[in-house]
Image (spheres, rainbow, N blue to C red):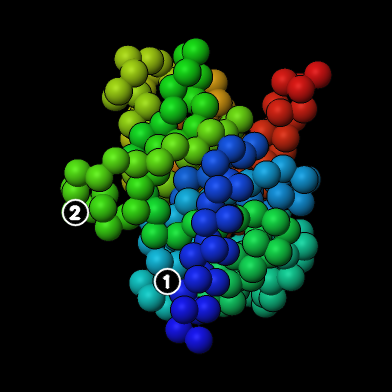
Amino acid sequence: MEQIVSAGIIDSYFKKLKESLNVDVAIVGGGPSGLVAAYYLAKMGKKVSLYERKLAPGGGMWGGAMMFNEIIVQRDAIHILDELKVEYKPYSEDFYTVDSVHATAALTYQATKAGANIFNCISVEDVVFQNNRVSGLVINWAPVHRERMHVDPLVIIAKAVIDGTGHDCEVARTLERKNNIKLFTETGSVMGERSLSVDEAERTTIENTKEIFPGLFVSGMASNGVSGSYRMGPIFGGMLLSGEKVAKLIATTLSVSVQ
C-alpha cells in the first residue's frame, strides 16, 4: 500500500506537470485576480496554469482585514460572485460583505473545476524572453528560491503571461531589470504603488489591467503597482473585475494571433 500511495502521487503530479510545459496562459500569483482570470480563461477553453509560491492560493483575500475574515465587494462585481457561486450579504446600498475563507475557497475550486491547473509551492524566478517578447516562465520550488540554493529551474512556455503578484509586481520588475526594455507605462518602468485611496484604487485597478509588454499582462494589485496608482485595502471588487478583464484581453489577443 505504501508504494501505491507514493507511486500514485508521483505519476499523477508528473503527468500534470509534463502536460503543462507548454500552455496558452501562465499566471503568476494565486490571488483573487489570478484565480478569476484562470477560471474565465479555462472556461473559454484555454490551457491555463497558475503558479503560487505559498502553500495555499488566495493571496490577501484569505485574511480579510487585519485577520477579520470578512471582505467587502461592491455591486459592480457581484455578477462574478454569482457566476462563481460565492455567497454574500448586503451591507449598504452598493456594498456587500463576504466571508473571505468561503470566497477564496470558492474561487480556487471554480478555477480548477473549469480546467485550470494550480501549482502551489512554486516560485517564478525569471521569464523566457524571445524575439523581444515574454514567451514563458522560469520556475523553481519556492523553498529552493527562498533559501537561495543553487538548483537549476524548469521552463514553461506560454503564449501569454499574467503578473498577478500583487504589491511587488515581481514579474514586471524582473523583466525590466534584466532586459533593458521599456514597459508600456508613463515612465517605461515599474512606477510603484502609492498609498491607500479606495475609490481611486478600485477604478484604476481595472483601468491599469492591460498588456504592459508583448506577452506580459498585469492584473490585480500588480496593475496599480506597475502604473503608479493606489492601494485599496480589503475591498475586492476591483480585483475580481481585473481578473475578468485580463482574461477577456488575453482571449482576444490569442484569437487575433491565430488568425
Q: Amino acid at mark 2?
A: Glu
Q: Is residue 211 visible?
A: yes
Is residue 185 depicted above or below 192 in this figure? above
Looking at the image, which residue sits at the far bottom? Answer: 1
Q: Amino acid at mark 1?
A: Gly
Q: Earlier in the sequence, mark 1 or mark 2?
A: 1
Q: Is residue 234 visible?
A: no
Is residue 231 depicted above or below 160 in this figure? below
Residue at 47% from the left image edge and 79% from the top image edge: 3
Q: Which residue is mark 1?
A: 63
Residue at 52% from the left image edge and 78% from the top image edge: 4
Q: Residues within 10 Å of mark 2 (few under 14, many from 20)?
A: few
Badge 2 marks a residue whose secondary structure is loop
Is residue 204 depicted above or below 240 in this figure? above
Quadrant where the C terminus lies?
top right
Q: Position of residue 20 (x, y in %)?
A: 58, 46
Q: Label for residue 147?
A: 2
Quarter assignment of residue 11? bottom right
